[in-house]
Image (cartoon, helix red, strand yellow):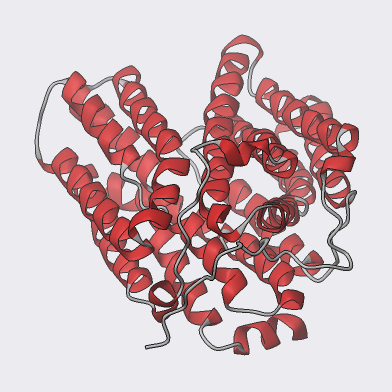
């Protein structure tokens, strides 16, 4: 932990981490809030699912596009514009009654305008710390983001069910505006300038490491989404058990990220970390049916904590390998593609788990999660040569041939 203390003493690091986590906090609330609100307005979970799907499609499309725009118009301009449009879209959704197609269009616009905070901050990090500190910083970032998934869903569920879904959406707008403004006004956002990329949109996917990060991220987050669906199906919506078990899954990830963050990243790092995830999820899938009901909470808590230990460390590898494999002018777009892969993975994991839950019960979701993780492990082993060896190097982006300007005032 001493390494993390030294890292947080670096000027601006603690502030930018806190600001970006606050700005991204609505990411753990928006989908659930939209689902609850549209279901209440229309009386149909199917209608709510369509609006949520439109929002997710918008987010997936926006990932690489708005991230790339930051190299054209600057981070602050893109972040401010997308923040304003997104906040307006959620506000209108909360306050205006409209037909389902209009809600879907509004959901699409809201998704398209999701501020690219994640791409921005991971582009900024290499300019804030030295080469030895960058990999631990990515690990710390991946670990601390679990706080979002521990607190945000519980908070929005309490507000939406105990106060109202309109108020829940408006709470998201307030946090989005406040956290977004804090991040946008952070000095580090104003200092770093991303050079305009000279290559076409999508050309960064020609880098094997970026493709691998996108594919593995798709599979890893697909596994996590299947777990979430399975836990909800196991315990239902009424009690606290589902929230407790999912929180422990995230706590395991947080602990794993902090424990393994100092370990150098080699070509086999992803495979080793996904092995932990696969073992934990396989134990969940194989043994759940023989655990008596009273012990289900304990069994799931234990196996999912084991699986969670590998999640944040695996994400840290994704971020580090992406950063180290592209030019600085391409980092934001590369992280945008990785984020899009994760969004599609979340949708695929939820969908597959949902079909299996309908067909064979909650255990089907855990089987799906284990399969997603196992495929990710197989990909990591089969294409191990595509993973960069950062044990004796660093995760800094490849310098551009033109000067990168930094504003000091």
| Residue 65 horizontal side relative to residue 82, left or right | right
The foreground one among 238 and 181 is 181
Viewport quadrant of the N terminus: bottom right
Residue 38 drawn above or below residue 384: above
Q: Residue at x 58, y 60 (%)?
A: 328
Q: Position of residue 7 (x, y in %)?
A: 66, 83
**Residue 348: where, in percent of width, then height?**
57, 25
Question: Relative to residue 149, is residue 181 depicted above or below?
Answer: below
Residue 209 image offset from top left, x and y in percent: 73, 44
On-image quarter of the C terminus: bottom left
Q: Is residue 169 something one can see in this rendering?
A: yes
Q: Point out residue 237 in the picture as x, y percentages from the top left corner.
A: 46, 35
Determine the residue positioned at 66% across, 62% down.
397
Is 68 drawn above or below residue 294 in the view shown?
below
Q: Residue furthest front?
A: 402
Q: Give the image quarter of residue 9.
A: bottom right
Compared across the picture, whether 214 is left or right of 35 comes to: right
**In front of the other: 23 or 124:** 124
């Amino acid at each position: 932990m001493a390494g993390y203390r030294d890292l947080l003493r670096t000027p601006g690091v603690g502030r930018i981490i806190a600001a970006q986590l606050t700005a991204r906090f609505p990411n753990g609330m928006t989908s659930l809030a939209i689902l609850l609100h549209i279901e209440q307005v229309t009386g149909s979970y199917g209608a709510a699912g369509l609006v949520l799907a439109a929002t997710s499609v918008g987010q997936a499309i926006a990932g690489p596009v708005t991230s790339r725009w930051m190299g054209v118009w600057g981070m602050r301009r893109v972040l401010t514009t997308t923040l304003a449009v997104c906040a307006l879209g959620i506000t209108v959704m909360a306050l205006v009654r409209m037909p389902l197609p209009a809600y879907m269009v509004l959901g699409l616009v809201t998704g398209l305008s999701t501020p690219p905070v994640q791409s921005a901050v991971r582009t900024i990090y290499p300019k804030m710390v030295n080469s030895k500190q960058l990999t631990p910083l990515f690990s710390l970032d991946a670990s601390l983001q679990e706080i979002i998934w521990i607190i945000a869903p519980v908070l929005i569920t309490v507000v939406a069910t105990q106060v109202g879904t309109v108020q829940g959406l408006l709470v998201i707008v307030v946090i989005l505006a406040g956290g977004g403004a804090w991040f946008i006004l952070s000095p580090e956002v104003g200092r770093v300038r991303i050079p305009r990329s000279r290559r076409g949109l999508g050309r960064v996917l020609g880098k094997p490491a970026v493709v691998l990060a996108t594919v593995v991220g798709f599979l890893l987050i697909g596994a996590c989404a299947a777990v979430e669906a399975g836990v909800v199906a196991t315990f239902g919506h009424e009690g606290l058990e589902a929230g407790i078990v999912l929180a422990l899954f995230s706590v395991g990830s947080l602990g794993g990220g902090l424990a393994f963050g100092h370990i150098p990243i080699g070509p086999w790092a992803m495979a080793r970390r996904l092995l932990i995830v696969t073992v934990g999820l396989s134990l969940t899938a194989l043994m759940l049916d023989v655990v008596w009901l009273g012990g289900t909470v304990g069994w799931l808590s234990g196996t999912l904590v084991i699986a969670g230990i590998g999640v944040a460390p695996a994400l840290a590898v994704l971020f580090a390998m992406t950063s180290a494999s592209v030019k600085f002018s391409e980092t934001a777009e590369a992280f945008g593609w990785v984020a899009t892969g994760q969004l599609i993975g979340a949708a695929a994991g939820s969908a597959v788990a949902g079909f299996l839950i309908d067909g064979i019960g909650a255990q089907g979701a855990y089987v799906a999660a284990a399969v997603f993780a196992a495929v990710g492990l197989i990909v990591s082993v089969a294409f191990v040569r595509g993973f960069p060896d950062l044990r004796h190097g660093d995760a800094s982006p490849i310098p551009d041939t033109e000067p990168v300007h930094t504003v000091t005032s």
